[in-house]
Image: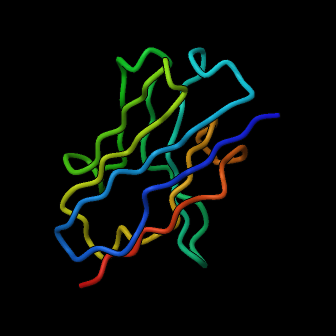
């Protein structure tokens, strides 16, 4: 059974930072390109970032480029998202996923950025 469990969210002020983690099991982590997506109620899921299986290729939503960094530890089957200079519009539930549409994703972790 594939499991993805996100953690690290919380409440921060504008300009603050958070590091999200996604621990996984049940699939060959090292072979998968992985994603972070976010969900704001009423707005659906929005792709945020992608990382290749070997971690050499990354891609970001323009809105977060330069502020967010995706990374992975294949030895620990764990995905990360380092978020800096957070803005209120970054507030969302963040999910890790094995596809860019978030069809197979974890339960998510709430990020709230206060102004």
Q: Is residue 70 above or below residue 5?
A: above
Task: Pick out the residue farthest to the front.
Answer: 76
Tell me the colour scheme of the image: rainbow
Q: Is residue 33 above or below residue 6?
A: above
Q: Is residue 26 above or below residue 12?
A: above
Q: Kindly indicate the quadrant of the structure image that contains residue 98.
A: top right
Q: Which residue is drawn at 29% across and 41% down?
A: 69
Q: Nearer the viewer, residue 52 or 42?
A: 52
Q: Quadrant of the N terminus?
A: top right
Measuring from the top left, give residue 63's x and y in whole percent. Answer: 30, 57
Q: Residue at x 51, y 58 (%)?
A: 94
Task: Pick out the residue farthest to the right.
Answer: 1
Q: Residue at x 56, y 53 (%)?
A: 95
| Image-based side of 19 in relation to 28, left or right | left
| Image-based side of 102 in relation to 90, left or right | right
Measuring from the top left, give residue 57's x and y in whole percent. Answer: 36, 22
């Amino acid at each position: 059974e594939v499991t993805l469990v996100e953690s690290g969210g919380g409440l921060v002020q504008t300009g603050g930072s958070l590091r999200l983690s996604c621990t996984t099991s049940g699939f060959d982590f090292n072979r998968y390109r992985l994603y972070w997506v976010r969900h704001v109620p009423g707005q659906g899921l929005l792709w945020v970032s992608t990382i290749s299986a070997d971690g050499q290729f990354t891609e970001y939503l323009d809105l977060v480029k330069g502020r967010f960094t995706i990374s992975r530890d294949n030895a620990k089957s764990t995905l990360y998202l380092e978020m800096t200079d957070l803005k209120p519009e970054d507030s969302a539930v963040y999910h890790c996923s094995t596809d860019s549409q978030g069809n197979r994703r974890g339960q998510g972790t709430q990020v709230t950025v206060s102004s």
